Image (cartoon, grey):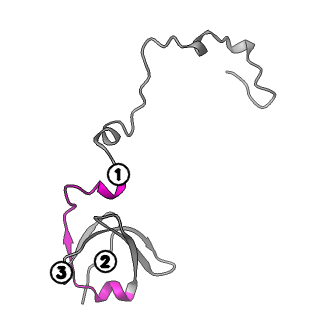
């Protein structure tokens, strides 16, 4: 019997089958635990099934991003906005007072 409490973003391994999965959501209202396996397959356990599993905590695998199809470029620039230092595109020539944005918008 399993005494581990599920935690979102935690990895577990089913000792019997050897399957490795990550808990991605817990719905307390319905009593379900949603998980995603390393190959991207998604499923859910109800609370009673979760406690019947033979689980052990596991480390995230090295290639955990495979189901999410993230590339190294996605990971490198995920939170950065690239703005050129010398922006001289066609929109730079538009004067703000010449734009009519209607009554709902104001340029401050």
Count neighbours of disc 3 (C-alpha within 10 A) and say few if under 14, some if 14 to 19, many if 20 or more.
few
Residue for badge 2: 5
Q: Residue 14's spot in the image, x, y percent?
A: 22, 79
Label 2 near label 3: C-beta < 8 Å? no
Marks 1, 3: nearer the viewer:
1
Count neighbours of disc 1 (C-alpha within 10 A) and say few if under 14, some if 14 to 19, many if 20 or more.
few
Inter-mark Cα distance, 2 to 1: 29 Å
Count neighbours of disc 2 (C-alpha within 10 A) and say few if under 14, some if 14 to 19, many if 20 or more.
few
N-terminal of the pair, mark 3 or mark 2, is 2
The residue nearer to you, when weighing 2 against 108, is: 2
Q: Residue 19's spot in the image, x, y percent?
A: 23, 74
**For residue 12, which quarter of the picture?**
bottom left
Q: Residue 100's spot in the image, x, y percent?
A: 77, 20
In the picture, the quarter occupied by the C terminus is top right
In percent of the image, x 28 and y 41: which residue is there? Answer: 72
The residue nearer to you, when weighing 105 against 100, is: 100
Which element carries disc 1, helix, strand or loop? loop
In the image, residue 50 lies in the stretch drawn in magenta: yes
Residue for badge 3: 15
Label 3 near label 1: C-beta < 8 Å? no
Question: Which region of the structure is painted magenta?
Answer: 48-68
In the picture, the quarter occupied by the N terminus is bottom left
N-terminal of the pair, mark 2 or mark 1, is 2
Which element carries disc 2, helix, strand or loop? loop
Q: Residue 26's spot in the image, x, y percent?
A: 42, 72
Please, is residue 71 above or below residue 47 in the view? above
What numbered label is drawn on residue 69?
A: 1
């Amino acid at each position: 019997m399993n005494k581990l409490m599920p935690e979102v973003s935690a990895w577990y391994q089913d000792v019997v089958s050897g399957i490795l999965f990550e808990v991605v959501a817990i719905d307390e209202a319905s009593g379900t635990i949603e998980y995603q396996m390393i190959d991207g397959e998604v499923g859910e356990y109800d609370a009673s099934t979760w406690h019947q599993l033979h689980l052990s905590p596991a480390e995230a695998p090295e290639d955990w991003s495979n189901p999410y199809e993230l590339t190294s470029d996605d990971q490198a620039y995920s939170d950065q906005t690239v703005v050129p230092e010398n922006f001289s595109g066609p929109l730079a020539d538009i004067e703000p007072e010449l734009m009519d944005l209607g009554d709902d918008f104001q340029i401050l």
